[in-house]
Image (cartoon, rainbow, N blue to C red):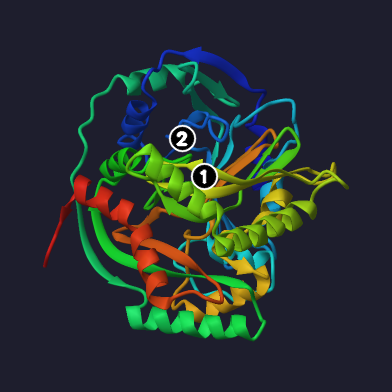
Amino acid sequence: MSVFGNLKQKIKKPKPKEIEIDNPFKLFKNLYYNYNDVFLLESMESDNGLSRYSIIGFNPIAKILAHDNEVKIITDTKTTSYHSENPFMELKEFIIKDYHEKGFRGGLVGYVSYESIKYIEKIPTNKSIYPDFEFGLFLDCIIYDNINKKCEYTTLNEDRSELIKQIYNQKHSNGILEYKLLDEDLTQEEYENNILETKRLIEDGEIFQAVISNAENLVIKGSKLPLYEHLRKINPSPYMYHIKLGEREIIGSSPEMLMRLERGKVESYPIAGTRPRGKNSIEDKNLEQSLLNDEKELAEHLMLVDLARNDIGKISKRKSVNVEEFYNIKKFSHVQHLVSHVTGDIREELDSVDAFTSLFPAGTLSGAPKIRAMEIINQKEKYARGPYGGSVGYFSLNGNADFAITIRTLTTYGQRAEIQAGAGIVYDSDPTSEYNECRHKRQALLQALKESGTEVIE
């Protein structure tokens, strides 16, 4: 029997039950200090239409990685490696399309790096130290309902609810976090020259927009949990996540969904156009109105809505694609964004992996036309993006999926870490403003670092 067959044999009928947990973060904290592979997906925004639940998992029965066409399946007893032309297709082995159930009911949780675009389009990418994707196969999960304040435990294998209760009652103090800021991938001069070169390509008619990013590099030692604990207070967002898979950790607060598939409906929320929040309600409303009257922001947003309609249309039933919300203002803790909502009904023969690969990567992290923009990104950015610009989320075994765009995120591999941000370059972009925008987008994470750890100057 194949390794996939052995793993699939362990998947049983879901057994949900209520357990007494009233603080999901406390549970995650205790699991974090007990296990090498854990995750927390949650929402810290009041808009429960986007994300209602905190989802926790630990100690998966397997990890599934892909890197440069090599698929690796790691269990407690063995590691299996083999070549695959398209590793995304391997993930389909675990998708059972049962659209009667909502949300997550056990499955693949992890991240997809930007460089995995090479499996979707024939585009050259830079060499990355990170896997192209990395998922844990979690056959049980703890789901906390933030509205009803109830906690459900679901297992598709052995019942570990008593173990969870024991771990929940443990007491752990946070470990020490130390970090040292290094440098950016691109100096200000290099970045601004890239913007000028990109603008010339726009003037030549090759693209309308490209998202050019820049990373802040650092060394980080000790427990990363204090960083996430501060980030969720400083920058609460619809998609908050802390995923630890061995020596790699993904910690972020993304405002933006890449895609969600639930009960056969696929959806995306393109975000483009930003203003800060006002100091009072009048200033806040004035800033909102200035965004709605900004022709450049509206044009860029329309372009990305059209891109989402096209991507969802590829995998949807005929005449089912709709723009359900258009040019809406969504207010977050520090900023307000222009947001639209695009939906479609997925075709019967397709599944969540097909939906994901149709929308990946996000137009808001690549550009338009998407393929040419990605070619330009590969030329202008010095190094691989890794998880930045990719996606974080889950493929549930019941066929559902929910993925955020990996932005406002710190990625770590051992003691190496990066905080990366990009700016959408259009015909009239100012190079210095775009460079400063990237720096501004990294500030919440840098502030969380400062408040949770000690900067080591050597």
Residue 282, relative to residue 30: is it above or below? below
Q: Which residue is mark 2?
A: 42
**Residue most extreme to the left:** 458
Count of labels in the image:
2
Assign a secondary structure to mark 2: strand
Amino acid type, label 2: Glu
Residue 141, relative to residue 269: is it above or below? above
Residue 183, relative to residue 89: is it above or below? below
Task: Mark yes or no: residue 241 visible.
Answer: no
x and y percentages locating residue 17 in the rendered image: 55, 14
Separation (CA) of disc 1 from disc 2: 27 Å
Residue beneath the point at 58% across and 31% down: 49
Q: Residues within 10 Å of mark 2 (few under 14, many from 20)?
A: many
150 or 132, which is in the foreground?
Answer: 150
x and y percentages locating residue 117 in the rendered image: 62, 65
- Looking at the image, residue 260 sits to the left or right of residue 297; the answer is right
- Looking at the image, residue 379 sits to the left or right of residue 118; the answer is left
Assign a secondary structure to mark 1: loop
Residue beneath the point at 31% across and 38% down: 233
Q: Which residue is mark 1?
A: 75
**Residue most extreme to the right:** 318
- Looking at the image, residue 325 sits to the left or right of residue 409; the answer is right
